[in-house]
Image: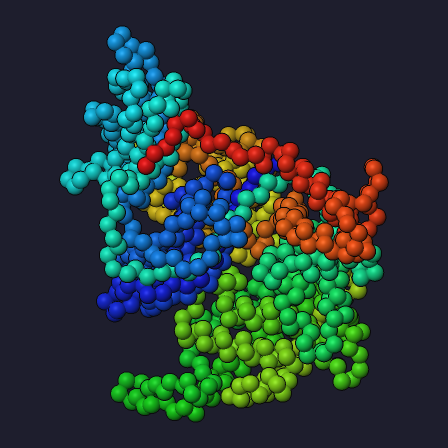
Amino acid sequence: MAKRSSLSIRIVEGKNLPAKDITGSSDPYCIVKVDNEPIIRTATVWKTLCPFWGEEYQVHLPPTFHAVAFYVMDEDALSRDDVIGKVCLTRDTLASHPKGFSGWAHLMEVDPDEEVQGEIHLRLEVLPGARARRLRCSVLEARDLAPKDRNGASDPFVRVRYKGRTQETSIVKKSCYPRWNETFEFELEEGATEALCVEAWDWDLVSRNDFLGKVVIDVQRLWAAQQEEGWFRLQPDQSKSRQHDKGNLGSLQLEVRLRDETVLPSSCYQPLVQLLCHEVKLGVQGPGQLIPLIEETTSTECRQDVATNLLKLFLGQGLAKDFLDLLFQLELSRTSEANTLFRSNSLASKSMESFLKVAGMRYLHGVLGPIINKVFEEKKYVELDPSKVEVKDVGCSGLHRPQTEAEVLEQSAQTLRAHLGALLSALCRSVRACPAVVRATFRQLFRRVRERFPGAQHENVPFIAVTSFLCLRFFSPAIMSPKLFHLRERHADARTSRTLLLLAKAVQNVGNMDTPASRAKEAWMEPLQPTVRQGVAQLKDFITKLVDIEEKDELDLQRTLSLQAPPVKEGPLFIHRTKGKGPLMSSSFKKLYFSLTTEVLSFAKTPSSKKSALIKLANVRAAEKVEEKSFGSSNVMQVIYTDDAGRPQTAYLQCKCVNELNQWLSALRKVSINNTGLLGSYHPGVFRGDKWSCCHQREKTGRGCDKTRSRVTLQEWNDPLDHDLEAQLIYRHLLSVEAMLWEKHQELSGGAEASTVPASPGKAPEDSLAQLLQVLRDLHEAHSSSPASSPTSEPNCLLQLQT
């Protein structure tokens, strides 16, 4: 039983941003921080004040997080990136919007006194005295303080104030994890109302000291408690009146949803899972037909989420093909015109989209990856619409001549024909590479459509049914937005985007089997018609081979692919090497190709070289970030593990960007989440000389100075299925439409007034809808009696934090 929190984040676009460059424009991107920890960086959109990102992320994190902040930055090639503004959403704000926060938010100016982070460890006591009681405040240590100096650290000290008297700790140089262990005492009068203020500062020799955060303690509550000790989150200084923002900083459109789920033990969900699986196995001949009922009671706005959850649940039960086959039959039963088949956002369409992303993403990368990379590398000017052609100069220096419109159109047509031909050839060669479950699902779709629309006049309909998903809803969106399908790390510039859009249109025309309707929409696509017509024949031949898979072949192919388990994560990283010994040792990073599976983290010189095992995943104890000052480099992570002899070891690996860093950390944490001996604390620095660089502790194997973040992960398309979580999400949805299900049950029961499920004592109801209602009731009772469902009390609740 566990309580899990997740954030669904969609960064849509910005508008009216201020110009930060001398050209009168900006190069904006977004950084997303959870409790001041950077977890996401969007792509940069060049030379615009109204950028569109359209990027979606899902982050899993502990329920105790406090806020998520969105920083809009301006990228600079030669100097430090400029901060344009930020939007901050607290956990309480998100919790007050059960359906999520959606809309435009004004960017606020970034105030250094509000940019605080970290926690401070205090022990507070009320002691008896000769004349009056004494208030003792022991300042023990702090962690994760904001680095304020150029060396990537701070020189922190603490100032304790009470009733006009101020005392200070010593200064700890170059540390964001200082330890003081200093104690201060103040006289305490009975009935005193003044608060105790503990402030952290960064000491500077020349300029003024930088504020690091503060904690304000209610002394009256402390008087009642007599003693309290714990970690307190540092708060910003909001005592100063906030000045109005200087000018308009623009706005950011966001969609953010917080979801807190209490996941019960697997046994609690078994009745729900078994009931749904039984319905799918029965198909359209089932007595209750719960799947159509779920579709009927699901609103359009949440249909995609429900489809994804159902699909993942049945995929984990080995029934994804049967579930989709049932949806195909239901869709076909209510479709009379072949040209409207699967055109709506039905549960079948949404489920199939999710299925292809979950089961076919690696296949898509193999087919489209080389084509997309070539388009990005060539950066050719491509245009087929005469009304949009830009005539430019061609030729060598001194011999420039304007290129004619006809030349531009002809060269563009040649480029697109080459890309389209290469894509179709790669697709035709990919039959064996397509996952068996995808092929079997398309086989069912092809057969069902051919049975529903027989005859020569509907010869192309089964092929179009397949291409409506494969080409129109999977390949074409990936071509138009390769960043959103993880095919590229950055968005395309305007020129490349136009090439990709035209290529996607051509793929859609091929997928539509070159119908007259598709040709009539954009007559200027005519130069591609020979390649499109040839592509239609190629595509039909490909689909014929794709769906030609029998049950035995499907099982054999699945068994073969299961033995060749794909890596969870792979790519180039830089591994830290130490040269020499003693005080003159130096450090360097060597580039190697790493591969992570569910069993081992291995490396090789090149992707095709023989791999050598570096770390057994069962031995991993933590995967965490490293302070930038440790190596003078950003985006470094550490994997803490034990070797075969049981000795603790640490591997330091550098990534090329913050997104890659978080993706690797997320992958490592997921595959080692069930390991025994996971650490609760670690050192974010390195042990150099005779002490840790982070907290200056001299004991190498001592307790870490920061807490680990093993539960902070990013959701990826290749994540392992979490059956209990999917069942919980389905239960949550069914609970939200329970009233509609009761109405439907009453209607099917002949209008009888019924407020309870009709069942004999100790006997389950016979019809499936009644069984479902009973299962929902049982799950509701299980949640009500669950300790994790009760509100959790914050530590140090007797000490009211004031700001």
Extreme residue in the top direction: 130
Across the whole image, how many numbered discs are drawn on residues? Answer: 0
Q: Position of residue 534 (x, y in %)?
A: 63, 84
Picture layout, residue 330 above or below residue 218: below
Quadrant in the rendering for residue 127: top left
Picture layout, residue 690 above or below residue 553: above
At 62% across and 60% down in the image, what residue appears?
299
- Work out which quarter of the rendered image holds the C terminus and state it: top left
Q: Position of residue 691 (x, y in %)?
A: 34, 29
Towards the viewer: 319 or 616: 319
- Work out which quarter of the rendered image holds the N terminus and state it: top right
- Judge from the rendering whether residue 281 lies leftward or rightward of residue 306; answer left or right: right
- Judge from the rendering whether residue 447 lies leftward or rightward of residue 263; answer left or right: right
Extreme residue in the left direction: 206
Quadrant in the rendering for residue 341: bottom right
Q: Position of residue 430 (x, y in %)?
A: 65, 68
At 83% across and 37% down in the image, what residue appears?
761
Q: Is residue 152 visible?
A: no
At 63% across and 67% down in the image, what residue appears?
345
- Judge from the rendering whether residue 248 lies leftward or rightward of residue 5; answer left or right: left
Towards the viewer: 591 or 497: 497
Picture layout, residue 701 above or below residue 242: above
Quadrant in the rendering for residue 582: top left
Q: Position of residue 105 (x, y in %)?
A: 38, 57
At 22% across and 35% down in the image, what residue appears?
203
Q: Is residue 711 visible?
A: yes
- Judge from the rendering whether residue 530 lies leftward or rightward of residue 440; answer left or right: left
